[in-house]
């Protein structure tokens, strides 16, 4: 049974767009926990466009399920992570102008920095996940620097427009999952996943142990409510 991590960034997006006090991501996290999600995922971006520092502290305080904090490999955010102590930190690339995370980390290129960066996190017992393209060399480099988890970036798969492209991307993900499994690392996947493409991915790649999904779930919740949105996705990944 694969796990479902629900990313609640876009609850905070809705709040920040008007600078109101609602909708509250802390409340959303508790509702989603009660609906049976396996973890809550939040991305504390350098530009604080959605989730804010206080949100992370409060969410960690009230949650009984694991918190997965996505962040860029920057010292300022690491200091916050070391104070909050999420169960997992997922390192992602970040560019200010992007609409959302584009592409995976280049662990091969940034090996020296990343190795040093993750050490204090792992020393206090935080699991470290690398958000990378389905690329075997990137997986190997992640294992070499001491990562615990590989989150396979599914964005290219999600955006593929033709059947042929989709199949090619699925094959890459399957190979990446098999390689990650052989390395003994935990296998997560996420980005751009919605109700249809998750269903296809799940059938093709049973090795994936955790799906981290946000936008599609929050979008469905607008029409059907969080309960239906989370339950429908839970059924697909399980
Ligand atoms: N996983 C990671 C590492 C991400 O950066 C994101 C987006 O913040 C997601 C999963 C969720 O992506 P989406 O909102 O497209 O489902």
Image (cartoon, grey):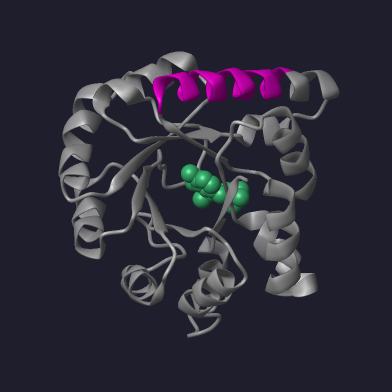
Q: Is residue 176 magenta?
A: yes
Instruction: Point out the stretch of residues depicted in magenta.
Output: 168-184
Image: 221 above or below 157? below
Q: Residue at x 44, y 64 (%)?
A: 65
Q: Is residue 57 left or right of residue 12?
A: left
Q: Is residue 194 visible?
A: no
Q: Position of residue 231 (x, y in %)?
A: 71, 64
Q: Is residue 195 left or right of residue 87?
A: right
Q: Residue at x 50, y 18 (%)?
A: 179
Q: Position of residue 48 (x, y in %)?
A: 39, 62
Q: Is residue 84 magenta?
A: no
Q: Residue at x 73, y 55 (%)?
A: 235
Residue that extends furthest to the top in the rendered view of this protein: 137
Image: 57 above or below 215? below
Q: Is residue 2 left or right of residue 164?
A: left
Can you say which quadrant of the picture contains the N terminus?
Answer: top right
């Amino acid at each position: 049974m694969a796990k479902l991590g629900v990313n609640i960034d876009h609850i905070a997006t809705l709040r920040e767009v008007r600078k109101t006090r609602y909708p509250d991501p802390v409340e959303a996290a508790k509702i989603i926990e009660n609906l049976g999600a396996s973890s809550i995922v939040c991305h504390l971006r350098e530009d604080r466009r959605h989730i804010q520092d206080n949100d992370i502290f409060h969410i960690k305080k009230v949650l009984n399920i694991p918190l997965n904090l996505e962040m860029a490999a920057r010292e300022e955010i690491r200091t916050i992570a070391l104070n909050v102590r999420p169960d997992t930190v997922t390192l992602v690339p970040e560019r200010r102008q992007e609409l959302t995370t584009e592409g995976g980390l280049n662990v091969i290129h940034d090996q020296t920095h990343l190795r040093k960066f993750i050490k204090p996190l792992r020393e206090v017992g935080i699991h470290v996940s690398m958000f990378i393209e389905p690329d075997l060399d990137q997986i190997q480099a992640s294992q070499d620097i001491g990562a615990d988890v590989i989150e396979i970036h599914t964005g290219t798969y999600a955006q593929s427009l033709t059947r042929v492209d989709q199949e090619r991307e699925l094959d890459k993900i399957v190979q990446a999952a098999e390689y990650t499994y052989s390395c003994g690392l935990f296998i997560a996947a996420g980005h751009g996943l919605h109700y249809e493409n998750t269903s296809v991915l799940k059938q093709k790649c049973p090795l994936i142990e955790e799906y981290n999904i946000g936008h599609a779930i929050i979008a469905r919740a607008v029409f059907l409510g969080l309960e239906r949105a989370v339950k429908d996705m839970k059924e697909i990944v399980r």
